[in-house]
Image (tube, rainbow, N blue to C red):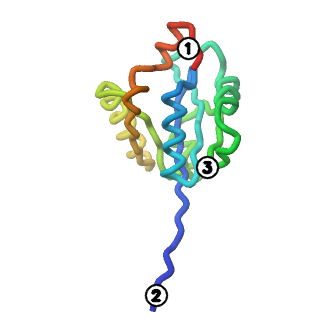
Amino acid sequence: MTNAPSTVRVRALYPGSFDPFTPGHMNVVSRARDLFDEVVVLVAVNSVKHPDTDEVQRAAAVRAALPVEWTSVTVAAWSGLTSTYCRDHGIGVILRGVRNTSDLQAECRLAAMNQSLGVPTVFLPAQPDLAAVSSTALRTLGGRG
């Protein structure tokens, strides 16, 4: 008696303010495509940050930056809790990119909270040549990604 392998589709959510969407963000999405069946880039509202554009405009900019052949990647705008979006849309894991130990410490706190709400987090380390670039640095220098 043989058991046929079951196929479990894993949908990952990559949330962020993406103001702007950087080469590092693009790299995380590109690598995530190899790990997950579907990746949703969630352009979220962060009450601490004050972007020049709203989440709908930023989502449109992210969508425009992604290659059209990346059909397993979708983009959405959201102003609620990330864990609520995951529950409402059947997403099993949150994906976060980390550039350095400071990022990792902050992300671990968020991951613990999201885990307590039923959604685990997977971390992808930044590619070394992209780790120094942040959205804040690009905004400060006048670039938009």
Secondary structure beneath disc 2?
loop
**Dot 3, how many residues are within 10 Å of its Cα: few (below 14), some (14-19), or many (20+)?**
few
**Relative to 23, does residue 137 appear above or below in the rendering?**
above
Whole-percent x and y of residue 113?
38, 39
Task: Tell which circle, 2 or 1, labels the residue nearer the N-terminal end.
Answer: 2
| Residue placed most toward the observer, 45 or 103 | 103
Q: Residue at x 52, y 52 (%)?
A: 36
Whole-percent x and y of residue 95?
46, 41
- Number of dots carrying numbers: 3
Figure quadrant of residue 52: top right
Q: Which residue lies most toward the top here?
A: 141
Separation of marks 1 and 3 at Cα, in angstroms: 27 Å
Residue to which mark 3 is pinned: 89
**Dot 1, how many residues are within 10 Å of its Cα: few (below 14), some (14-19), or many (20+)?**
few
Give the amino acid at mark 3: His
Separation of marks 2 and 1 at Cα, in angstroms: 56 Å
Q: Which residue is drawn at 63% across and 49% down?
A: 72
Task: Tell which circle, 1 or 3, labels the residue nearer the N-terminal end.
Answer: 1
Residue to which mark 1 is pinned: 50
Give the amino acid at mark 2: Thr
Secondary structure beneath disc 1?
loop
Whole-percent x and y of residue 122?
40, 45
Q: In this view, does 5 lie to the left or right of 75?
A: left
Residue to which mark 2 is pinned: 2
Give the amino acid at mark 1: His
| Residue placed most toward the observer, 20 or 67 | 67
Q: Which residue is drawn at 58% across and 38% down?
A: 41
Whole-percent x and y of residue 135?
50, 19
Q: Which of marks 2 and 1 is in front?
A: 2
**Relative to 97, does residue 17 appear above or below in the rendering?**
above
